[in-house]
């Protein structure tokens, strides 16, 4: 076979290359640029090597924010995934209830993130918010602006409210793809409800759950808008997660070098976790087949 | 194993059925013997899957009762009826091995592990799955998956009946034949009551002791393959069973004979007595196997019907001639070495195999 060489084909790739360059590569390289230099103005800059990275990695505030972030993301996943599966299992399979529940579930997903923050900020206020007022009426001393625990719970509940629907919808789609014959066969085989879940429903939901967990991991690990609006990272630094800490360095203190170094570390953490998770799950699937 | 009684059973998918057409299953009364192999045969939409689902308990009939060995199970769920069912498309538990799949119905019922192992190995041996027991079921082909489904249906030896819902649809033609033989063997060996739904007459006739032919929500005939062939109780049975199906023609009874397009076809007294009381539309049916076609010069048309031969197909082991007289096309099955000469001939009807139908029902 003679391979036909035609370099004109490269022109067809150019538009994509151009778009990706503008949207991803150039901004990323800018960040890399900032992370290894100390820049005062375009003419005055010094190459500093890994100094910013060392400084950022040694920063106690970063360690604290990272730990908070990990606890937060784990809590989100541990609550939203089982809850989402449970809700998906109880949704109606036919009739008018299907569309009604779809609409209800999709609503939180359609609300802009800062609006979600605002809704909960008002809802949770002890003086004028319905939620906060009722809780205080019940004799529980609740104030998310002063009590770190209350702030944490409010941020978590807000995230669960906002995003569980995503897991529900994904799982529901997975469940709907199971033919009736499977349930009938399981019934005839005498399978318990748990066995039906374990051997029919869960395997069918596996691939959508992988996507769901990845999306929720990335989104919650990068969460910024909602806690920023709701608690502003407080009280103190109780709900200051990585993004918010980054913004404090970059925009608040205008330390662009450390901020850039931090951004890269942040990016690599997410990339690494997603890659490890995806590889482990997919390999587990392959090993089973052999 | 159990005898299955269907007592004045009927089913409609409408909450308030009015006419006969509203019924997916018209009222029926049947007793299916313990240890029999029954095939439910009929075209798509004739109600055979509805009937199967009523027997398995996936569907509760709107009228009548289902009895297993005299016990009313009409309201019982499938798992309480002690039956096994194999579905049209393979149902396997992806994450389990072949062994675990086969053991699943037994383990769910708390059978002890020694007995489970015994049964699983026995059934796997019968279905040629022994070498694959340790594999995950997920990676197997459709054929093998369906074989596992069959195995799960057969693995319990205490079931009242094993029900098959067109189980070989997804299987290769070659393997179909092998699996059908296997099922037949297993039936001969273990004598479970088996009910097998299919729209393929070859499958029904080779598998079953008794074939239940269904048409338009009714059981039109229940009989052995031979009975269906020799004595179709309904024109549909004549047409559906056999290849090619029965020739069915409108006719008039007059002057001690049947008349089709002005041609006289002799009938026996048995026919004439039976048809005398009938008022509905009369049809005459005869299987292509029981017609004689004579050709060549000097063939007398006495006691026969002169016809034009429009087509002769040679199918290897036999020939099928399509003949025409008046407005009727009649197929004749001929021996492989029959010589056909010319465009015309004389058809002779064997009176003992000539059937008369009034409103599609056999009268004689």
Image: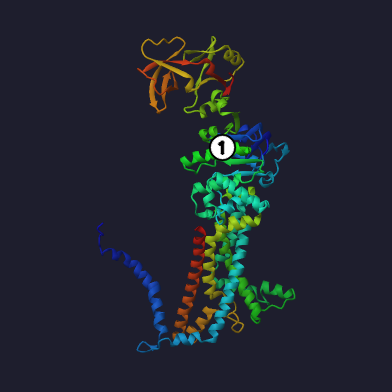
Closest to the observer, A163 or B349: B349
Judged from the image, the secondary structure of the residue bearing numbered disc 1 is helix
Closest to the observer, B162 or A202: B162
Q: Position of residue B258 (x, y in %)?
A: 52, 14
Q: Is residue A94 visible?
A: no
Q: Position of residue B151 (x, y in %)?
A: 57, 46
Q: In the drawing, does residue A192 fall left or right of residue B355?
A: right
Q: Give the vertical position of B314 relative to A99 (above or below).
A: above
Q: Position of residue A252 (x, y in %)?
A: 50, 85
Residue A104, quarter of picture: bottom right
Residue most extreme to the right: A139
Q: Give the vertical position of B185 relative to A49 (above or below).
A: above
* Residue at 44%, 85% in the rendered image: A257
* Residue at 47%, 27% in the rendered image: B244
Q: Position of residue B292 (x, y in %)?
A: 45, 17
Number of residue marks: 1
Q: Identify the chain of the residue marked 1, using the numbered disc in the image.
A: B
Q: Dot 1 surroundings within 10 Å: few (below 14), some, or many (20 or more)? A: some
> Label 1 belongs to which residue?
B184
Residue A88, quarter of picture: bottom right
Q: Is residue B276 visible?
A: yes
State which quarter of the image contains the N terminus of chain A.
bottom left
């Amino acid at each position: 076979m003679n391979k036909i060489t035609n370099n004109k084909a490269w022109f067809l790739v150019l538009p994509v290359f151009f778009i990706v360059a503008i949207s991803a590569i150039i901004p990323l390289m800018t960040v890399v640029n900032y992370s290894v230099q100390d820049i005062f103005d375009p003419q005055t800059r010094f190459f500093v090597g890994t100094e910013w990275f060392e400084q950022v990695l040694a920063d106690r505030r970063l360690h604290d924010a990272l730990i908070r972030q990990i606890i937060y993301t784990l809590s989100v996943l541990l609550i939203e995934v089982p809850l989402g599966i449970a809700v998906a299992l109880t949704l109606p399979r036919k009739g008018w209830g299907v569309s009604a529940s779809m609409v209800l579930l999709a609503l939180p997903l359609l609300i802009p993130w800062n609006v979600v923050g605002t809704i909960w900020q008002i809802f949770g206020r002890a003086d004028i918010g319905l939620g906060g007022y009722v809780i205080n009426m019940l004799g529980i001393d609740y104030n998310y602006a002063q009590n770190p625990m209350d702030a944490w719970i409010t941020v978590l509940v807000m995230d669960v409210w906002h995003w569980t629907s995503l897991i529900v919808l994904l799982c529901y789609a997975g469940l709907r793809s199971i033919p009736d014959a499977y349930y009938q066969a399981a019934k005839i085989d005498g399978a318990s409800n748990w066995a039906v879940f374990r051997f029919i429903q869960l395997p069918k939901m596996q691939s959508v759950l992988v996507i769901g967990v990845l999306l929720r991991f990335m989104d919650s690990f990068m969460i910024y808008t909602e806690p920023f609006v709701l608690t502003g990272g407080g009280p103190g630094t109780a709900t200051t997660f990585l993004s918010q800490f980054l913004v404090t360095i970059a925009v608040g203190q205008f330390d662009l070098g450390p901020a850039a170094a931090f951004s890269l570390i942040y990016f690599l953490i997410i990339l690494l976790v997603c890659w490890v998770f995806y590889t482990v799950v997919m390999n587990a699937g392959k090993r089973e087949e052999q | 194993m159990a005898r299955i009684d269907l007592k004045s059973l009927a089913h409609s998918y409408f909450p308030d059925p009015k006419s006969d057409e509203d019924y997916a299953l018209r009222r029926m009364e049947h007793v299916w013997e313990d240890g029999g192999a029954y095939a439910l045969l009929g075209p798509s939409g004739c109600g055979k899957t509805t009937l199967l689902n009523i027997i398995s308990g996936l569907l509760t009939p709107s009228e009548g009762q289902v009895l297993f060995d005299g016990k009313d199970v009409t309201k019982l769920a499938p798992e309480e009826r002690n039956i096994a069912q194999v579905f049209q498309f393979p149902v396997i538990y992806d994450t389990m091995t072949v062994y675990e799949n086969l053991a699943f119905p037994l383990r769910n019922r708390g059978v002890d592990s020694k007995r489970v192992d015994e049964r699983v190995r026995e059934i796997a041996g019968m279905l040629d799955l022994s070498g694959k027991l340790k594999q995950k079921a997920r990676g197997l082909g459709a054929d093998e998956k369906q074989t596992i489904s069959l195995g799960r249906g057969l693995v319990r030896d205490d079931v009242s009946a094993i029900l098959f819902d067109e189980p070989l649809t997804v299987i290769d033609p070659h393997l179909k034949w092998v699996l059908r033989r296997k099922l037949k063997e297993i039936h001969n060996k273990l004598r479970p009551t088996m009910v097998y739904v299919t729209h393929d007459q070859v499958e029904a006739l080779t598998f079953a002791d008794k074939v239940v032919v269904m048409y338009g929500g009714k059981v039109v005939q229940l009989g052995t393959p031979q009975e269906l062939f020799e004595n179709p109780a309904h024109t549909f049975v004549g047409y559906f069973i056999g290849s090619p199906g029965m020739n069915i023609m409108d006719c008039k009874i007059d002057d001690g004979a049947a008349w089709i397009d002005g041609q006289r076809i002799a009938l026996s007294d048995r026919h004439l007595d039976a048809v005398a009381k009938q008022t509905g539309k009369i049809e005459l049916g005869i299987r292509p196997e029981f017609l004689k076609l004579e050709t060549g010069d000097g063939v007398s048309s006495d006691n026969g019907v002169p016809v034009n031969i429009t087509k002769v197909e040679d199918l290897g082991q036999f020939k099928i001639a399509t003949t025409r007289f008046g407005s009727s096309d009649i197929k004749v099955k001929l021996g492989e070495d029959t010589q056909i000469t010319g465009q015309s001939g004389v058809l002779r009807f064997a009176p003992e195999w000539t059937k008369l139908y009034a409103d599609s029902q056999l009268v004689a």
